[in-house]
Image: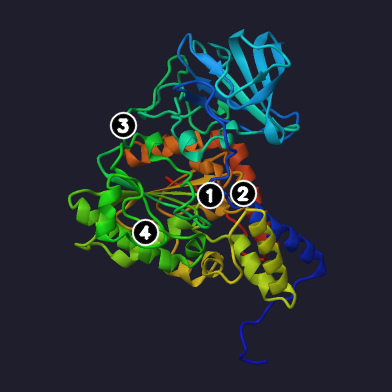
Amino acid sequence: MAGSGPAVRPVSRRRTGALLGALVLLVWALPVVGSAAAGYRLPVAGARLLRGFEPPAGPYGSGHRGVDLGGSAGSAVVAASDGLVVFAGTVAGSLAVTLAHAEGVRTTYTYLSDVRVGQGTRVAAGTALGGVGPLHLGQSGRVGVHWGARRGDIYFDPLELLDANLAGRLRLVPLGPTTSRLAVPSAQDGGLGSSEDTSAPTVLPQGPPNDNLLVFVPGIDTSSDSPAGFDPAALGYPSGRAFFAGYGGARSQSSIAPVAGSPEAFRAPFGREDSWAGVARGAAALLDQLRAIHAAHPEAAVDIVAHSQGGLVARYALMLAGATNPDLPRVAHLVTLATPHGGADLAELVLRVQRLDWGRLLVAAVLAAGRSAGLTHLVPGAASFADLAPGSGVLAMLGYAAPPGVATTTIAGSRDPVVPLTRAWLAGAESYVVQASHGSILRDPQAMAIVWGALADDPVPHALFESLPGLLEGVLVGNVESGLFDQSPGVAPRNPRG
């Protein structure tokens, strides 16, 4: 009927299967905060993260199937969890131990100085398996352990086994000095930065990057009861200088005092459904919390680090606040991680499918299955679906440029199917891409090094030519999604300095 609503473009049968598959991908690809396996610990006390996990492109492709953890000479390498020793011996000239754990997980500890357990032995978490030994190529002169994890034949990042807060406390120790006080691993090591001299270690500067307060804004499907997935201590922030924002507004003054100094000090409790109530509502909640922070710390400026939808929430709040507002702190920096500044094609998918005769029932069934499996708490009709769709009113209102007067940095993940890098750029911002997925970007060591440099006004040097495979991978994801959902095709990112 005329005037009954916007015209709906027919969806061909050929495309229906792709839509169904992508809808399932939406549920399964969203970050599940706090889903780490229980009962795992770091295998080296006081470990430093020397090199992160770099998944291979295929079963025989190159990559780094684990993480390198630095330790002190003489330190023990211990079992990360209870398990059965299924291998203890030499592999390619290096001593290694492999443990079988519950739920089909196997962890391997390589480059040991000695082996202290035998095959067939059951060990408890914390049992010494051997000592740290000299690491392999690229870590010359360092001692530690290469820690790997897999389920079946599929390798995954062993840091995913840890509680999010514990994993976040691992500090990246980059290789080689550059013109910046920070360095990230070079292209030869799977990183994005350049390194002129890898012979001498460069340690991430101690302490926070500046004297400002830090506020972290989480994304969708989060709650005050779930781990944030982001640890300010990894950037050197002490207690009382970094706070988590939320979608429930600010705590009352009487309830702040008992948790003063805690990251939770200023945000009121909120549920996952609150995080799906839309960008405008999230921005209003953030402004309430910023007012409370300013009242407690009237002289301090604030830096905002935001994940996914949280980046749009932060930009919307800055737009509402205006250039000067005596009730709010000055925001000096904004860093967004995997934020859909150009919209999320999967949000458009949900809206489009729901317009079909059978779509509402399908979306409800898929989301119900996701909730039953503990993968998501999405509900049909959530306001954020409309806000995050490309071309939405919220995105049009925000525009596609960095907030004026705020030093802005965007970081995208080349392996992010939820927000491909072609949707994560923002005009006027320093823009980077790291080889990470939508959820893992919060603990990606390269991403954290970039965050530290951005907040210190000492940005990691751009070396986009060294990350061509990652860029092509991200652009491909973006263009495939754009073509699938009939959106305007993704655009290859411009040189952010150009």
Compared with 348, 139 (above or below) is: above
Location of residue 134 in the rendering, given as x and y in whole percent from the top left corner: 55, 10
What residue is rendered at 59% in x and 66% in y?
Answer: 379
Q: Are marks 1 and 3 in contact (CB under 8 Å)?
A: no
Query: Label for residue 33?
Result: none
Rate crowding at label 2 as few (under 14), some (14 to 19) or many (20 or more) other CA atoms within 10 Å: many
State which mark lies toward you, 1 or 3. 3
Q: Residue at x 67, y 73 (%)?
A: 354
Q: Nearer the viewer, residue 102 or 159?
A: 102
Of label 4 and label 3, which has the lower sequence position?
3
Query: Label 4 vs label 2: CA separation?
Result: 39 Å
The residue indicated by pointer 4 is: 268
Estimate how packed mark 1 is, as few (under 14), some (14 to 19) or many (20 or more) residues with alpha carbons within 10 Å: some
Residue 98 picture quarter: top right
Q: Are marks 4 and 1 in contact (CB under 8 Å)?
A: no
Of the image marks 4 and 2, the number of the one nearer the N terminus: 4
Q: Is 431 displayed left or right of 131 in the figure?
A: left
Q: Of helix, strand and loop, which one carries label 4?
A: loop
The residue labelled by disc 3 is 207
> Gap between marks 1 and 2, in whole Å?
8 Å
**Of pointers 1 and 2, the one earlier in the residue sequence:** 2
Q: Residue furthest bottom?
A: 2
Alpha-carbon span between mark 1 and mark 3: 33 Å
Query: Label 4 is placed on what type of residue?
Result: Ala
Does residue 396 sit above or below 88 in this rendering?
below
Q: Amino acid at mark 2?
A: Val
Quarter-wise, where is residue 459 in the image?
A: top left
Would you say the residues marked 1 and 2 are in contact, meaning their CB atoms lie under 8 Å apart?
A: yes
Which is more toward the observer, 141 or 424? 141
Which one is in front in this view, the residue at disc 4 or the one at disc 2? Answer: 4
Image quarter of the N terminus: bottom right
Which residue lies under the disc numbered 2? Answer: 475
